[in-house]
Amino acid sequence: MKRRSFFALTGLAALPAGASTAGQVYASGDGIPHSTEDYARLVARLCEGGRLEADNYSLGGVVEALEKKFAEALGKESAVWMPTGTLANQLAVRWLAGTKRRVLVQAECHLYNDCGDCSQTLSGLHLIPLASGKAAFTLEEAERAAAGAADGRVPLAIGAIQIETPVRRKSGERFDFSEMKRIASWARGRRIGLHLDGARLYLESAYSGMAVAEYAALFDTVYISLYKYFNAASGAILACPKAMADELRPMRRMFGGGLHHVWPFAAVALHYFDGFPQRFQKAKETSETVITALAKDGNFDIERVPNGTNIFRLRVRGVNALVYQQRLDLAGITARAPESGEWYSMQVNETWTRRGADDILDAFRKGLG
């Protein structure tokens, strides 16, 4: 496949998720929800005229085109498609740590809490969790952990540090960037590998005002999710040095991740990749206008996550929360059921570009009855 011919597709970037939901705003999830029919129709459109070249065991074709796009955007030599973020994070810290098996992580990070101890069980790594209950740890905490490992009866060295930002378990709170730079500088001076779990990094970029490459420059490797907001059915990207990519492709297969064909995932992610920062920036601006107006309206309470990203909490006064949720859906805004009976956890995603701020605000108010 000629990359030029694939990226010259016209009119596809604005494809709606489905005719019946084209104007629906989803205040839940990080991306655009697709039904199975929506997804199949999109893949079929992308395939028209032989514009897609299939991969072979996750190599070549549209998968390679996707890898090159992300590597360029993140300022890395190369990138490798991975079936899951779980595998991307594990293989990254495994490679970076080498023979030094201790890895510093946030206590609230995905790799430490939600991956079944894969790094410990399958890669023999020892994860050291820092800053329990917080989004970020400090350089001083990293230094103490490193000193504690080195001062034991059997001196041990830290092989890698993983930082996740924004942090899912802290409702999208960001890792303080100035502290991140201090930690990265300290680690570089000690030949400690640095991995960024940036599953939602493109979302954070819109709120911090910094390009994703500015974050990536601090790290050896960066993981980006392909399904959370690039709307693929599955998949992840791990951007890294070329020598590392050459080793990770066979290692991916060793872990059962060298799937025969992943082009239906890669094609959709690549389709939504171009122009995403601009589209999400528009969604963010629209949502900020709505949130500001709701905060001034006595019928609503708004809570923002300190140093947060695309998640905010909303409470409605004088209306049963479940009744309000139903009315809101009829007005064209889909939200999750309220937490603790009254607070809604709202998320901003690309669907917030489907309607203007005034129209969305009117829908929130219509739900009051």
Image (cartoon, rainbow, N blue to C red):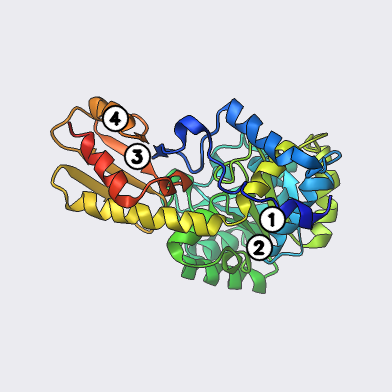
Q: Residue at x 65, y 41 (%)?
A: 86
Specify whether residue 225 is in view. Answer: no
Percent x, y of residue 210: 51, 67
Question: What residue would you read off at disc 2?
Answer: 73
Above or below for 33 versus 280: above
Q: What residue is disc 4 on?
A: 325
Q: Which mark is residue 154?
A: 1
Tell which circle, 2 or 3, labels the residue nearer the N-terminal end: 2
Tag in front: 3 or 4: 4
Label 2's element? helix
Closer to the camera in the image, 330 or 158: 330
Q: Tell me which label, 1 or 4, sits earlier in the chain.
A: 1
The residue that mark 3 highlights is: 345
Q: Are marks 2 and 3 in contact (CB under 8 Å)?
A: no
Amino acid residing under circle 2? Ala
Of 74 and 184, the residue lying toward us: 74
Determine the CA span between mark 2 and mark 1. Answer: 42 Å
**Callout 4: SS:** helix
Q: Amino acid at mark 1?
A: Val
Residue in view at x 28 percent, y 50 percent: 358
| 3 and 1 marks in contact (CB < 8 Å) | no
Measured along the vertical axis of the image, is residue 326 above or below residue 11?
Answer: above
Mark closest to the chain's N terminus, 3 or 1? 1
* Rendered image quadrant of residue 341: top left
Q: What residue is rendered at 50% in x and 61% in y?
A: 205
Residue 8 place in picture, x, y as percent: 71, 55
